[in-house]
Amino acid sequence: MEAIDIAESQRDRLGAVLAELQHGVIVVDARGNEVYRNAAAERYRAPRHADAVAAGAIAELLEQARAGHAVDRELQLFGPPRSVLHLQATPLGTHGSLGAAVVVYDVSEIHRVDSVRRDFVANVSHELKTPIGALEVLAETLVTEDDPAITRRLAESMVKEAERLARIVDDLLDLSLIETQEAPRREPVPVSVLIEDALDRVRAPADGAHIDIEVDDAAAGAMVGCDRRQLVSAIANLLDNAVKYSEPGSGVCLTTAVVDRRLAIAVSDQGIGIPSRDLERIFERFYRVDYARSRATGGTGLGLAIVRHVVQAHGGEVTVESVEGQGSTFRVTLPLDAVDIRGRGSDEEGGWPTPR
């Protein structure tokens, strides 16, 4: 009797462990009858097409395992949502005499990270190669050029390419620092100071393009607990993007307010807008809606990625609304624990400030 109690206790303990696993586990006996399925594997009973495909593959691998063959397979499901499963089936007993078990690993996130890493390396190589190649060609031409006027133009072009290379490296370093920080340093900073610092960074290109930046700083008196340098960089990147993708002579509007006990910052432009197919990808590193225009204006393709990481690191979120040909509005919110709502412009009823 004691041996039975011990066996039942071990069985219950094993069942509890398997039930808590994030991986799906399914066990069948020698006849192929299911004897165990944990909670993570329940989804593969669902009638959805992707789950039905996974269920068919699981059944096929269990049959092979019952025949004594240890097998594994990677299965790509196109969803929605898209996912990648790794199935590993093992015979139980001698050549499957006791049945078979299959473990289902959801490796979607691993594949996504690997894909992002590969894309990042490829994009960095491409982005650095362009200005470096231009510098090489300009230097070679400069060596053989005797005309002072042409020499001056070549030197000016080299300076521009060197500045572009420096911007890419600076943005990469900033992004790397933001991503590796567990949490940003926080100090109380007036919203008005953040806005003024960000405006200082974009006044020159805005003036050069004859673009007026209108500011409605209703939350100027609010104090934000933040990493000042990072948040200024995020706001400046939004303004810089708005300026770059606006037509000369048009306007950009920046508004701030405290909405539903959250700090709200909105940057709107009347520029070229963003096609709906690109809206989900614009915060990716090096992703550009208009590559030619971005290159012409000296963009690195990292600005919006920096914005997203800075805002998320501060516990907030950033969203975008855009109509192609009519302009875009980027909205940033920071949570209550990062905001002193004693500043003016508080709106307990909620509702976003409407950019003019």
Image (tube, grey):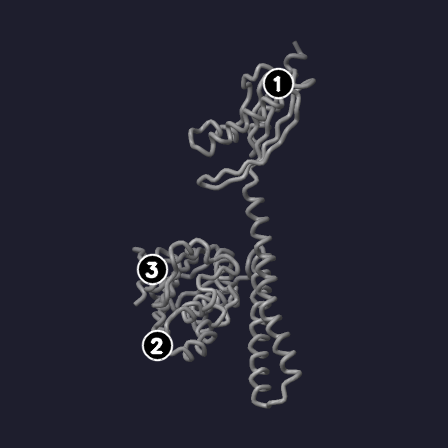
**Total marks placed:** 3
Q: Earlier in the sequence, mark 1 or mark 2?
A: 1
CA gap, disc 2 to disc 3?
20 Å
CA gap, disc 1 to disc 3?
58 Å
Question: Is 156 above or below relative to 118?
Answer: below
The answer to whether residue 249 is left or right of residue 72 is: left
Q: Earlier in the sequence, mark 1 or mark 3?
A: 1
Question: Is 74 above or below relative to 275?
Answer: above
Which of the 4 quarters of the picture holds residue 162?
bottom right
Residue for badge 3: 323
Q: What is the residue that sits farthest to the right in this orientation?
A: 94
Expressed as whole percent of the image width and height from the top left, the position of residue 142 reads 63, 82
Q: Amino acid at mark 1?
A: Gly
Residue for badge 2: 249
The answer to whether residue 329 is left or right of residue 38 is: left
Q: Amino acid at mark 3?
A: Val
Q: Nearer the viewer, residue 140 or 234?
A: 140
Q: Residues within 10 Å of mark 2 (few under 14, many from 20)?
A: few
Find numbered disc 1 in the image and state the secondary structure of the residue it sits on: strand
Can residue 314 be spotted in the picture?
no
Q: Earlier in the sequence, mark 2 or mark 3?
A: 2
Can residue 93 be spotted in the picture?
yes
Find numbered disc 2 in the image and state the secondary structure of the residue it sits on: loop
Q: Quadrant of the C terminus?
A: bottom left
